[in-house]
Structure formats: C-alpha cells, structure tokens
Amino acid sequence: MAITEEMRHQIYEAFRASLGDEVANSLMEMLPPVGWADVATRQDLAAIEERMDLRFGVFESRLGEQIQCLRVGMHRELREQASRFIGWMFAAVGISSTIAGGIAALS
C-alpha cells in the first residue's frame, strides 16, 4: 500500500499532537519521501554498479581500439609526409647543384 501525501500529513499531525513539533519533524525526516518499494537497496546499487562496470569496460575497449587506429593512421601519414619531404629535399638539392654547376661552368 502506497502512502499518499494526505496520509503522511495525518501521520505528521498525530506525531505532532502527541510528541511535539521537534520530535514529529525528526520522525518525518527519517521516513522516505516515497513508498518503501521506491527506495533503492544495497543489492539494487550493487547491480547498477556491476552494469556500469560492464558498460565502462566496453567503452574503454572501444575507445582503446579507436585510439590505436588513429595512432596507426597518424604513423602512416607521418611516414608518407616524411618520404615526400625527403624526396622534395633531394630534388631541391639536385636542382641547386645543377644550377651551381651551370653557374660555375659559365664563369
């Protein structure tokens, strides 16, 4: 049986009439604001914790896989860029050498 707000108020008034305001307030503060069926138990919290641990485990696993994919992709991209850069540098040195040799031959 769920306790309605009207029933809670009647209980409070009965406590207040027989025990006084301070005791009635203290007793009402000890009662849950909802029915006992709506109060979470330790087992409820443990079950939630277990589900959350499983979800976070899956999340961490997926995140780790994605980070690894990004690392592999970045490594590949950096290697390709470094290869292009070195190629361009060799080309620039070769062209510079050719120009320098041509200038030296004209002098």
Image (cartoon, rainbow, N blue to C red):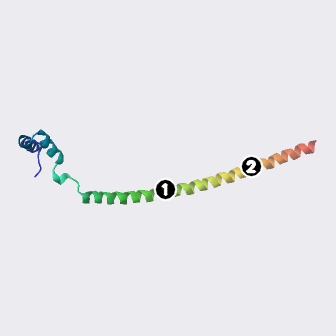
- 32, 16: nearer the viewer: 16
Q: Which x, y percent locates residue 19? A: 8, 43
Q: What's the residue at 19%, 52% (across, down)?
A: 38
Mark 2: secondary structure = helix
- 44, 84: nearer the viewer: 44
Decide if residue 88 is in sight here.
yes
- 3, 55: nearer the viewer: 3
Q: What's the residue at 56%, 57% (across, down)?
A: 72
Location of residue 77 with respect to 25 vertically, above or below: below
- 66, 51: nearer the viewer: 51
Q: Which x, y percent locates residue 97? A: 83, 48
Label 2 crowd (10 A; few <14 / some 14-19 / many >=20) = few
Taking the image as shown, residue 97 lies to the left or right of residue 62, namely right
To which residue does mark 2 refer?
A: 89
Looking at the rendered image, the disc whose residue lies closer to the viewer, 2 or 1, is 1
Quadrant of residue 103 in the image?
Answer: top right
Which corner quadrant holds the C terminus? top right
Mark 1: secondary structure = helix
Quadrant of residue 104 in the image?
Answer: top right
Q: What's the residue at 32%, 58% (across, down)?
A: 49
Determine whether label 2 and label 1 are within 8 Å by CB. Answer: no
Q: Which x, y percent locates residue 29? A: 18, 45
Decide if residue 33 is in sight here.
no
Q: Amino acid at mark 1?
A: Gln
Taking the image as shown, residue 102 lies to the left or right of residue 77, namely right
Count of residue discs: 2
Q: Amino acid at mark 2?
A: Met
Taking the image as shown, residue 53 lies to the left or right of residue 22, namely right
Q: What's the residue at 23%, 57% (across, down)?
A: 41
